[in-house]
Amino acid sequence: MMAMKATAYVVGPHDGPGAGLTEMVRQFDFVTVQRFAGVIQAEQQAARTPVCFFLFAAVDNVGNLRAIADAIRFSANRRIRFSPLMYFSESPSSQAIGRCIEMGFDDVVTMPFTPARVMERMTRQIGRRFTYYETARYFGPDRRGRLAMPQRVEEVEPDGQFRRLEILRHLGTGVNVVRDDFFQPAAGAQRARG
């Protein structure tokens, strides 16, 4: 198994799914595995381990995770903001997966949670380019076209403004923004929609 020279934060209950997830990721050779205790804690840790994984254990109502996901995704610290957010779903539903996509999660892992399968999903998050979108209400991976999500950012944002970013996560250097483009529709296009 590949050594994960990163930090893993487990978000969710201390028992049941949270305890099981914590136990599993401890075998992946993360520099540290910790319970999530807030963005400030994660920002301090990101200075020591440039990549932090936020691993969300299964909960009864995925919507209850929004405040934590937003705190991470809208953090001023780039290493935190672009961190992988992964939800571990014990009973996947298209509604729960859709909610995770809306909150900017990078991946939703369904059962079985075998070490090999989970490690493979985590390693996908490192060493590849990802496209992220930022609007007034969303920041996360480009997930358009999934689960009947809008195909154009303009369908979601009334003013049509958005940023398109290409990132690369590296275990040694953290997050590198390879490209950062700001898009604003022409004034005529704004009036035509209104």
Image: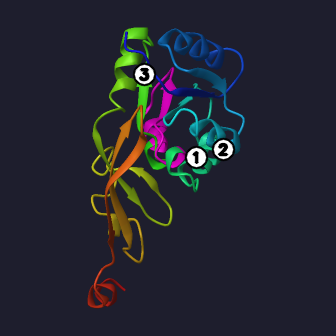
Q: Amino acid at mark 3?
A: Thr
Label 3 belongs to which residue? 110
Quadrant of the rendering where the C terminus is positioned:
bottom left
Disc 2 marks a residue whose amino acid type is Val
Task: Tell me which segment is drawn in magenta.
Answer: 80-100
Q: Nearer the viewer, mark 3 or mark 2?
A: 2
Question: Closer to the N terminus: mark 3 or mark 1?
Answer: 1
Q: Are marks 2 and 1 in contact (CB under 8 Å)?
A: yes
Q: How many marks?
A: 3
Q: CA distance from mark 3 to mark 1?
A: 22 Å
Name the residue located 60 percent from the left edge and 16 percent from the top edge. Answer: 22
Q: Classify 183 as above or below 34.
A: below
**Magenta stretch: residue 88 in it?**
yes
Q: Secondary structure at mark 3?
A: strand
**What residue is drawn where x is 60% and y is 21%?**
32
Return the x and y of residue 170 as percentages of the image width and height. Answer: 37, 35
Mark 1 surroundings within 10 Å by alpha-carbon count, few (fewer than 14), some (14 through 19), many (20 or more): many
Residue at mark 1: 72
Q: Give the residue displayed 32% in from the left and 28% down from the top.
A: 124
Residue pictured at 47% horizontal, 57% vertical: 138
- Left or right: 96, with 191 as reference point: right
Looking at the image, residue 86 lies above or below residue 156: above
The earlier-in-sequence mark between 2 and 1 is 2
**Image quadrant containing the N terminus:** top left
Identify the amino acid type marked 1.
Ile
Residue that numbered label 2 is attached to: 39
Residue 18 location, quadrant: top right
The answer to which of marks 3 and 2 sits earlier in the sequence is: 2
**Horizontal side, residue 97 vs residue 74: left or right:** left
